[in-house]
Amino acid sequence: MFPKTLCCGEKRHAIGERQNTFVCAFYPQSPRISAYEIHEWIYDALCLREFEVVMIQTEGPKRHVYIKLSYPSRMQDILTSTTGHAEYQHTNGVISKVRIEAVGFGLRKVGIANLPSEFADSYIRISLGKFGEIRDIQNDSCSNAYRYSVPIGIRIATLNLVQHIPSHIIVAGHITLISYERQPTTCYGCNEMGHLYQVCSHRRRPGAVDARMTRKSWAHVTAMGPKEPQDKTEGRG
């Protein structure tokens, strides 16, 4: 059997879901594997380097090895390169099948806001399809307690997530707001997960002009009125 406990790195009892973590599920009847052998297999088979691994933890009875990584993008690389499957060859020559999958995904109700009601669901399916299998899309509506029991401009998609969705994505040219339970924090600037824009390392240096701040809003343009046409005869002798 596997070691009962194996935890590398700081141990935290955080409330909530594992993040940036995938599990290597060994065949339940696998022969015993030592902690050292697990580490060597992770290094050789998954090509993970020391700086990429935050935590390794096993659940002996289940033959599960949980690996937490520094970056969510690296976890996606592992899932893609292995296609969810690997093998472990024991010292006696026996080969165990290993299933590799992300932890903390599965079916989710995903709220989609800021899209015109005229947009077909097909646009949503195209944009969200890379994040998981879309089972269903419905309009969220007011309850019967309201005078007008009509859609409120938010659609609810049921997805079998394979990777987390940023809190804002582009759908057919529209900046669309995405929300669901236990969604990781997303930076508005670089669109990476795990931090907010205020502390983003990709922000421009102080004093640099942000193009988004220099664009004139529609309200500003209309308040200024139409631009006077230039007199073509001006300056002629």
Image (cartoon, helix red, strand yellow):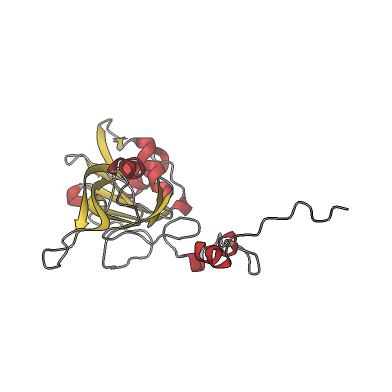
Q: Nearer the viewer, residue 138 or 179?
A: 138
Locate residue 127: give its quadrant: top left
Q: Is residue 185 left or right of residue 28?
A: right
Mark yes or no: residue 51 visible. yes
Locate residue 98: give its quadrant: top left
Q: Is residue 201 left or right of residue 41?
A: right
Question: How many tags in the picture?
Answer: 0
Mark yes or no: residue 59 visible. no
Locate residue 122: give its quadrant: top left
Q: Is residue 207 left or right of residue 72?
A: right
Q: Residue furthest right?
A: 237
Residue drawn where x is 28% and y is 30% of the image: 93
Residue drawn where x is 54% and y is 66% of the image: 220
Q: Nearer the viewer, residue 150 or 62?
A: 150
Q: Nearer the viewer, residue 168 or 221?
A: 221
Q: Residue furthest top?
A: 93
Image x and y of residue 143, in percent = 14, 63
Q: Eyeballing the image, is 121 above or below 219?
A: above
Q: Eyeballing the image, is 3 above or below 43?
A: below
Q: Eyeballing the image, is 218 above or below 173?
A: below
Residue drawn where x is 51% and y is 63% of the image: 200
Residue drawn where x is 11% and y is 64% of the image: 144
Q: Nearer the viewer, residue 128 or 200?
A: 128
Image x and y of residue 230, in percent = 71, 55
Image x and y of residue 90, in percent = 29, 36
Image x and y of residue 148, in percent = 17, 63
Q: Is residue 29 left or right of residue 35?
A: left
